[in-house]
Amino acid sequence: MASTVPSVPTKLVDVEVATAARRNTPAVVLAATGPALGPGGDGIDASELTGKAGETVRHDDAWTLGVGTGSLSDYRTAGASLVRALSGDDAPKSADVLLTPDFDAEKMRAFVLGAALGGYRFKVTGEDGPKRVGSLRLVTGDTGFDEVLTSAALKAHALATATSLARDLANTPSNVKDPRWLATTAAKLAEKQDGLSAVVRDEKWLAQQGFGGVLAVGGGSARPPRLLELTYGTTGPHLVFVGKGITFDTGGISIKPADGMHLMRTDMAGGGAVISALLAVARRGLPVRVTGLVPCAENHVGGAAYRPGDVVRHYGGATTEVQNTDAEGRMVLADAMAYAVKNLKPDLIVDVATLTGAMKISLGLRTGAVFTASDEISANVIDAGAKVGEKWWRMPLLEEHVAAVSSEIADYKQCPSGPGGIAAALFLQKFVGDVPWAHLDIAGPARSEKVYDEVVAGATGFGARTLVELAEKYSR
């Protein structure tokens, strides 16, 4: 089955930093708004150039690349546009990008992120993919070799690798990607990474331990659920990242409309972000403890599917009255978070999920939602995202809706009344006890229908970079 999809992870464009350009290699000259040409621009006719971010123009054996006003978004767009332009039958194997003297670490990170991710492609086909430039040399010129710039480029490429893997996992069709495939694929990748270990628990273990939420959601599918646990580090603060791993979501008995259901292969994008982040944290050797939990299940329709009106007992004993089987994400997250609280002694829990359509309406398709009672945690998440090109917005945990989470027949209601995204967060909050916690709803930015900045159509990998940057912040 695995042979029917592209290899995971996808190969990205390689990047190196050097002081000198190469002979017989296409040069790329940067052009700021105006345009204002950077090094190598002598002799290039700039009369028809604007310098707009992403503007790529070929001039015989050289290219000009617009970097706009020099914002970080402009540099991500520029890097992505360059790699897309250097594609096709005449794509060079490599190119030299002649950096301007003002190129700093932030610009380097943004440009490399764009360049590494802009050419991403995931297509199930029997044909060879289009040719693409294989590597870029970023030339510092007379400013000399800069360790800071080199370090920034390496970090950005590591973040891009995490984003790309998260895209790969989410894009994989669900006839291949069942709970077992997702968990075992992640475990195999973890085995190759020093310092990272993985354990995959099957449905028998889940039943013995009382993971009622995961078992209920996965009960309607012939492909049983799994729990993936990734473990990294032994010292420092202990962070637990929990990712929703619903490998396909029909909605269950509360079935979804047919329009758009094909996109539900990406409903495990939160789990993909957690898996990718743990691998990146381990590769970078950050001095922090991180555990990744991904409850994996397929929410299907079948004779054993859970029903509206059922009462489900979660790990640890708390019970939930089911009201809508399409609100399955919170059911599996609740089990995993209760497990973390009881067994892992975390200093912080962050759950990531494509949880509610309400957040797509509230924040659109490019911004993730942050729910937490802590001003500090909220600021840390938003700041981490800003540093890696992912936008977050804090949403309130409104006290006036807390009472609605209580059920008359069980401990909690699965879908309490009130605004959808907030109500879901208030439900999840019941399972973290006194542990500092943030809930990240990525229903909007996890998928894209079009190309922008470093994003391509399909799964975006949103959230993975923020988690890595957050781990780095707590490791200082």
Image: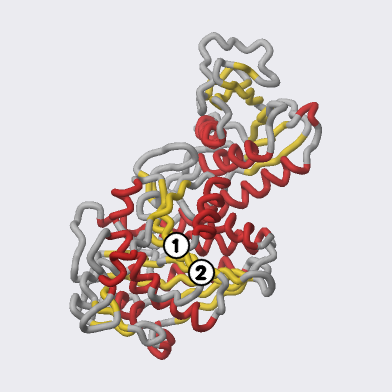
Q: Position of residue 10 (x, y in %)?
A: 53, 52
Residue flagged by tag 1: what amino acid is it?
Thr
Residue 324 in view here: yes
**199 left or right, relative to 139:** left
The disc placed on residue 372 is: 1
Residue flagged by tag 2: what amino acid is it?
Pro
Q: Position of residue 298 (x, y in %)?
A: 33, 70
Q: Tell me which residue sits at (32%, 59%) in the image.
A: 421
Residue 125 in view here: no
**Depth order, front residue of 159/353:** 353
Dot 1 or dot 2, earlier in sequence: 1
**Depth order, front residue of 123/282:** 282
Secondary structure state at the residue bearing disc 1: loop
Q: Position of residue 458 (x, y in %)?
A: 39, 48
Q: Tell me which residue sits at (24%, 78%) in the image.
A: 407
Determine contact: label 1, label 2, CB under 8 Å: yes
Residue identified by numbered label 2: 436
Q: Quadrant of the N terminus?
A: bottom left
Q: Tell me which residue sits at (54%, 35%) in the image.
A: 83
Q: Quadrant of residue 227?
A: bottom left
**The furthest residue to the bottom:** 208
